[in-house]
Amino acid sequence: MVGVQQQLGLEGIPDKLVRVTPARLSTWAGCPRRYRMAYLDRPAPKRGGAWANATLGAVVHNALKAYFELPRDQRTPQRAELLVHRCWKSDGFADSEQAAEHRRRAQRWVHDYVSALPADFTPVAVERWVSAPVGEIIAEGRVDRVDERDGELVIVDYKTGRHGLRVDDAKNSLALGLYAMAVRKTLRRRCNRVELHHLPTGTVTAWDHTAESLDGLRERAERLAGEIQEATDALDSANANDVAEEAFPVRTGPHCSWCDFRAHCTRGQQAAPDLRPWALLGDG
């Protein structure tokens, strides 16, 4: 269930503050049925197997986390490559040869990425959990990295997908916007800039938020959180299959091909083709 924290209103009437993460909001927006199976159904339906592209992304994130936790004088591009090797997993890859090729790619990405950083660079925070009231919700999540530039904090999110990124990807990212607002309150520092660091291409896609643009993302998050809470309350009060179907409808699309709960969703199976676990690597 979505977490709810009671807060006294102006006249002593409790107002609900819904505790959400960007992952929960994204799951709901993509498909309410998937949200129900992921977070509410008990016993939880069995998930599908690992996806190679997700494994690759997790390895790069873990290697960079370990890298920035090292003393600064031990941070070298060669050490970063070694950390990729140590963090490596082969879940979802077609075979050992494909896994080895992508491990080498990841090592090259990370080597080149840290080589481009200033010699004296040290982030403010790495893999920092933030939780703070933002409007009518409590925004929570783990930020890949928080930097400081020109006296202000910057949200950094690593990306390892096969496609490049656009400015709108940073501008419209609900996760990055919520992280910026939560970091402001958690660290009590100004934070407007959000960045997507695409390691395969070595590019940075950035956006400097205004009060208005952050308000727009906050309102979007509040709307989604309200929908989640309404559907969850309906399920709790009735606990009937017809309510579950109505309150948590299937939302089909290409994403049905890689849904964790594809095996439990006939409509999803009909809407999109089955994919191999390594198909999203873009190897052809």
Image (cartoon, helix red, strand yellow):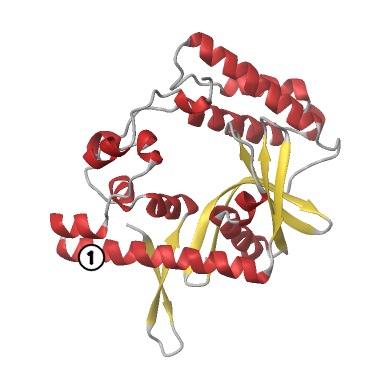
Kind of residue indicated by mark 1: Ala
Residue toward you, 111 or 255: 255
Q: Is residue 150 above or below residue 43?
A: below
Q: Is residue 28 above or below residue 257?
A: below
Taking the spot 47% from the left edge, 25% from the top edge, the residue there is: 52
Q: Is residue 193 above or below residue 160?
A: below
Give the quadrant of residue 150. Answer: bottom right
Give the quadrant of residue 71. Answer: top right
| Label 1 residue SS | helix
| Outermost residue to the bottom | 11
Q: Is residue 12 left or right of residue 145?
A: left
If the image is split into quadrants, where does the N terminus sit? bottom left
| Outermost residue to the right | 119
Residue toward you, 115 or 13: 115
Taking the spot 85% from the left edge, 38% from the top edge, the residue there is: 118
Query: Where is residue 238 drawn, in percent x and y?
Result: 15, 64
Q: Is residue 54 left or right of residue 236?
A: right
Residue toward you, 265 or 17: 265
Query: Where is residue 171 drawn, in percent x and y?
Result: 63, 56
Taking the spot 72% from the left edge, 53% from the top edge, the residue there is: 154
Which residue matches tag 1? 234
Could one spot residue 193 in this view of the protein? yes
Within 10 Å of disc 1 (Cα), the crowding (few <14, some 14-19, many 20+) is: some
Could one spot residue 240 in this view of the protein? no
Residue toward you, 40 or 259: 259
Query: Where is residue 79 drawn, in percent x and y?
Result: 73, 22
